[in-house]
């Protein structure tokens, strides 16, 4: 029987329906073998898919006749493919799928029913290149099935794969190796694609066959010859890499590599070549990297007592260090990157030896110079529109820095000396060097901050005077040499990055603060023509001010004056092409820096007390900073309320929200030493909060403006006392919860949690007033969910998770009596919702929260006379079943770490009930609950005994119990 394929669409539809039918393979196999050239490729592919499905699911247990028939069909199909002329050759995807199907048959049949499988394939090779191509594809597919390196295989599959490899080693591997040699030689001129495929097969199989079959004179001579052929050399290099990577005795590995290196060197292949074809250079570099790493691995594996062996391997490694340096220094970054592993392994080996010889130092110094040189940007790097090439170079630079850091750990004095000499020389003549050289110099100085150890985080003081002096010399020259005025944005940014990193230098030498401030504030920094420089400088300036706020007291007034134009709020949306210097995000940093300067002028650490300001002065300065901001908000709010254009309304709301963010950010300037109250600034922020509440209540773009209000309130919880903040909260809550949408509820919960965590019982009156409507709103919001709307379901899960955290915060903040004061029906809803979350919520972290919450409630109410009515019944009828039904669910994965924590919390919950009810719980479990579960008596007794034991024993037992029950 075969398929009738006159109508292609109907045939395809029919074939798709055959996957689930065990006998459907027969018409598909017949169609493949008799369809001829006119058969559509899609139908061929679907026929092969049906065969693949059959072999995976049914073939192993099929009767002998069916198995024999399938093998006949497949042999015929193989012969058809192998006999085709080049013009008629099947498409690659058909040949690949054929190979995959035949590999599946091999896995099932080779050991028992088809022991001549490989020999039958070898016999086909006489049919020509199509046969060789299919043969190699089948071998690759067999390797994927038997030695899958990327998939975690089951023990049975691994054992069967090992058995197949043993049989192949016994029967056919030698013949296969001969066939590979024949293919390499026969087709090296006429069909390079097949030869490259053969290289790949050898590379795949070498890991588990006898190395001597390949690592011999006849094979190596062919591989070396192929290394000289532009069409074959990449595949040959990869094949050689697989050969040297094969596991073997360390000395044997060294001898193999050394003999191979001699042959390659004699052929002039083991060195970087002047070749525009960088792909081959990358393969060659990977081969050199493999040679180095494998030798170092062999050195590590040798016993330390084997001094002669270790010395021999080390000599071999050192002889390859020239290759390492040559490839590391390649003009092609991907070639250089290919030997990173060799470089790191070499550094680690020298470190482990414990002694750095002068020869080693010379090599390491050369490596350091190469790193410095390779750090430089290319002329083609596009800073204005960074694409894939730029991203790749950025990653390359990061990898260079890893090697640099490794060097600094191994030879810190050498690294510091070389870097100091290079930095001092380059900074001294930066006007005469390229921008790439200047940037690399400053970047090197920046990298030293992480690479060279600092004394308590300070590079400029401490016991290491030579290091401190060198760092001071470099940073001092950086400030004084004038490189801050370099016109290239990359150099400018790197300069300010260095200044921010080494801010402690200015504590040691404060006389250099003034020129750096000027650089930050003028055309070199935040007024730079480049938006990137301005943006980065605004952030780095904030860091600089935050670290040196007391040292900056004498300059505060001047700085604030110069910052004034950057504090102006535009009443039109920001555009990168506008004349405004800073984007809204950048302006946030400038406002915080300004506030830090004002608050820092309290004289807390200033060396010039005369420059300090009184609390009244600081309050006045903060008023000057915030009042224009609030006036803009008032003006924009009036405009927004009257505007009928929705686009303009949205733009105005965004600006108002930005003003709120700026106000909130200024509050970060206050600290425990300089509080908002001690600076007499409370009234400013209270006024701002009231104004922002009014803006939300305009009911225009409510969601956008609510975001800004929440931001400010979160900060005020940190900065204000309860007496100042709590009077604001009822109006704020009413404004923020006006719509009771899922989003507004989700965003409000962290705010009230923060409030309760800080003020505890002080905020009980506010929480009591908001508790009932808030809980009702949440229950109403999550009550109905459209099952087809994934996003809505996700948002409601997020709200529920926040709700559980909220209830947990209520309890942990000592506000549990507020729950008890809820209406009885609502309290029941709340308690049942927590039980439901513990059992049904699809997130073990949330389940853990729910069980922990139940435990805390039981701890308070389990044996208390103040507990709500029927609470004991609730424990027995709801909590106890939850502690069993949740872990017994199929979705409750006992091997998952988060789920295990939820399980332990459920166990603690039961322990807490036992603490409250004692033997009454044991009796209930043994006489009532376990019989309902149909639990075996011995397990019931075990569980009750464990529950009565200590807590640690019970927690460990619970996991074993549920594993046995499930």
Image (spheres, rainbow, N blue to C red):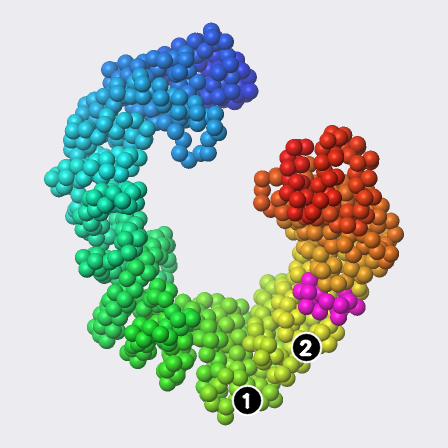
Mark on residue 31? Answer: none
Examine the image and state in which quarter residue 427 appears: bottom left
Residue named by callout 2: 686
Q: Secondary structure at mark 2?
A: helix
Please indicate whether residue 860 sits to the left or right of residue 154 in the image. Answer: right
**Residue at the top extreme of this rendering:** 65
Rendering coords of residue 773 (x, y %): 79, 59
The magenta stretch spans residue 622? no
In terms of depth relative to the viewer, which is nearer, 204 or 18?
A: 204
Magenta stretch secondary structure, dominant: helix
Rate crowding at label 1 as few (under 14), some (14 to 19) or many (20 or more) other CA atoms within 10 Å. Answer: some
Alpha carbon of mark 1 to alpha carbon of mark 2: how far?
23 Å
Q: Nearer the viewer, residue 830 or 208?
A: 208
The residue singled out by tag 1 in the image is: 613
Which residue is nearer to you in this view: 798 or 460? 460
Q: Quadrant of the C terminus?
A: top right
Picture layout, residue 727 above or below residue 31: below
Residue 754: image x %, image y %?
67, 65
Q: Measuring 26% from the left and 34% from the top, which residue is drawn there?
A: 243
Kindly identify the residue that appears in the image at 43 percent across and 12 percent down: 70
Q: Which residues are magenta?
A: 752-767
**Does residue 758 belong to the magenta stretch?**
yes
- The answer, for residue 35, to whether it is visible in the render is no
Q: Nearer the viewer, mark 1 or mark 2?
A: 1
């Amino acid at each position: 029987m075969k398929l009738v394929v006159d109508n292609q669409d109907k045939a395809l539809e029919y074939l798709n329906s055959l996957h689930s039918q065990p006998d459907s393979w027969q018409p598909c196999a017949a169609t493949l073998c008799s369809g001829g050239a006119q058969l559509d490729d899609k139908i061929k592919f679907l026929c092969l898919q049906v065969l693949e499905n059959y072999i995976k699911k049914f073939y192993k247990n099929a009767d002998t006749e069916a198995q024999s028939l399938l093998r006949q069909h497949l042999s015929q199909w193989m012969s058809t493919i192998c006999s085709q002329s080049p013009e008629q050759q099947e498409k690659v995807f058909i040949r690949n799928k054929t190979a995959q199907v035949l590999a599946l048959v091999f896995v099932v049949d080779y050991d028992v029913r088809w022991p001549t499988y490989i020999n039958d394939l070898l016999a086909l090779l006489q049919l020509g290149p199509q046969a060789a191509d299919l043969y190699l594809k089948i071998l690759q597919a067999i390797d994927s099935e038997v030695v899958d390196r990327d998939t975690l295989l089951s023990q049975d599959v691994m054992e069967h794969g090992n058995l197949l490899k043993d049989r192949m080693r016994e029967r056919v591997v030698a013949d296969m190796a001969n066939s590979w040699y024949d293919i390499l030689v026969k087709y090296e001129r006429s069909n390079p694609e097949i030869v490259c495929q053969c290289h790949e097969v050898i590379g795949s199989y070498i890991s588990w066959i006898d190395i001597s079959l390949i690592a011999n004179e006849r094979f190596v001579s062919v591989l070396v010859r192929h290394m000289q052929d532009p069409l074959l050399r990449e595949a040959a290099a990869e094949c050689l890499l697989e050969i040297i990577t094969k596991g073997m005795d360390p000395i044997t590995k060294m001898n193999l590599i050394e003999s191979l290196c001699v042959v390659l060197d004699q052929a002039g292949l083991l060195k970087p070549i002047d070749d525009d074809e960088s792909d081959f250079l990358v393969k060659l570099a990977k081969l050199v990297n493999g040679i180095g790493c494998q030798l170092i691995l062999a050195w590590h594996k040798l016993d330390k007592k084997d001094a002669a062996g270790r010395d021999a391997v080390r000599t071999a490694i050192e002889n390859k260090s020239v290759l390492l340096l040559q490839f590391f220094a390649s003009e092609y970054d991907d070639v250089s990157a290919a030997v990173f592993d060799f470089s790191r392994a070499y550094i680690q080996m020298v470190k482990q030896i414990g002694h750095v010889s002068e020869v080693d130092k010379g090599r390491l110094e050369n490596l350091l110079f190469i790193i410095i040189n390779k750090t430089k940007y290319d002329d083609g790097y596009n800073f204005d529109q960074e694409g894939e090439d730029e991203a790749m170079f950025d990653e390359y630079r990061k990898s260079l820095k890893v090697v640099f850091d490794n060097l600094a750990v191994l030879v810190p004095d050498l690294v510091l000396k070389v870097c100091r000499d290079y930095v001092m020389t380059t900074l001294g003549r930066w006007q005469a060097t390229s921008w790439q050289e200047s940037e690399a110099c400053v970047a090197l100085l920046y990298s030293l901050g992480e690479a060279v150890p600092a004394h308590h985080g300070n590079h400029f003081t401490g016991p290491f005077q030579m290091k401190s002096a060198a760092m001071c010399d470099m940073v001092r020259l950086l400030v004084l040499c004038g490189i801050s005025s370099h016109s290239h944005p990359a150099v400018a940014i790197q300069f300010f990055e260095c200044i921010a990193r080494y801010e402690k230098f200015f504590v040691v030498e404060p006389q250099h603060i003034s020129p750096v401030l000027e650089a930050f504030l003028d055309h070199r920094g935040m007024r730079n023509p480049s938006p990137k420089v301005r943006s980065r400088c605004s952030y780095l300036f904030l860091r600089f001010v935050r670290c040196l706020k007391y040292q900056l007291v004498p300059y505060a007034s001047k700085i604030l004056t110069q910052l004034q134009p950057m504090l102006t709020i535009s009443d039109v949306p920001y555009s990168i092409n506008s004349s405004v210097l800073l984007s809204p995000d950048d302006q946030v940093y400038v406002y915080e820096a300004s506030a830090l300067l004002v608050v820092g002028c309290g004289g807390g650490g200033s060396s010039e007390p005369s420059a300090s300001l009184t609390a009244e002065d600081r309050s006045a300065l903060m008023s000057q900073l915030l009042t224009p901001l609030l006036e803009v908000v008032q003006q924009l709010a009036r405009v927004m309320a009257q505007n009928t254009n929705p686009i303009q309304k949205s733009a105005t709301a965004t600006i108002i929200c930005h003003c709120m963010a700026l106000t909130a950010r200024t509050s970060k300037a206050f600290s425990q030493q300089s509080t908002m109250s001690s600076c007499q600034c409370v009234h400013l922020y209270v006024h701002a909060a009231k104004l922002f509440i009014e803006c939300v209540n305009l009911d225009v773009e409510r969601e956008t403006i609510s975001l800004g209000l929440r931001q400010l309130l979160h900060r005020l919880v940190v900065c204000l006392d309860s007496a100042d903040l709590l009077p604001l909260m009822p109006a704020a809550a009413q404004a923020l919860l006006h719509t009771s949408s899922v989003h507004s509820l989700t965003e409000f919960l962290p705010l009230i949690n923060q409030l309760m965590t800080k003020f505890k019982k002080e905020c009980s009156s506010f929480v009591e007033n908001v508790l009932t409507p808030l809980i009702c709103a949440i229950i109403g919001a999550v009550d109905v969910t459209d099952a087809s709307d994934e996003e809505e379901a996700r948002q409601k899960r997020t709200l529920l998770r926040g709700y559980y955290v909220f209830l947990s915060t209520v309890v942990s903040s000592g506000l549990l009596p507020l729950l008890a004061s809820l209406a009885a029906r609502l309290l029941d809803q709340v308690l049942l919702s927590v039980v439901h979350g513990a059992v049904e919520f699809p997130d073990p972290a949330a389940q853990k929260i729910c069980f922990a919450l139940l435990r805390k409630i039981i701890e308070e109410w389990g044996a208390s006379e103040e507990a709500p009515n029927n609470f004991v019944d609730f424990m027995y009828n709801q909590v106890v079943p939850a502690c069993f039904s949740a872990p017994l669910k199929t979705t409750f994965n006992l091997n998952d770490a988060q789920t295990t924590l939820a399980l332990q919390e459920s166990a603690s919950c039961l322990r807490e009930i036992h603490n409250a009810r004692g033997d009454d719980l044991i009796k209930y479990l043994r006489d009532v609950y376990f019989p309902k579960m149909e639990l075996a008596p011995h397990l019931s007794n075990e569980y009750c005994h464990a529950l009565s034991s200590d807590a640690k024993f019970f927690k460990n037992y619970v996991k074993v119990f549920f594993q046995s029950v499930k």
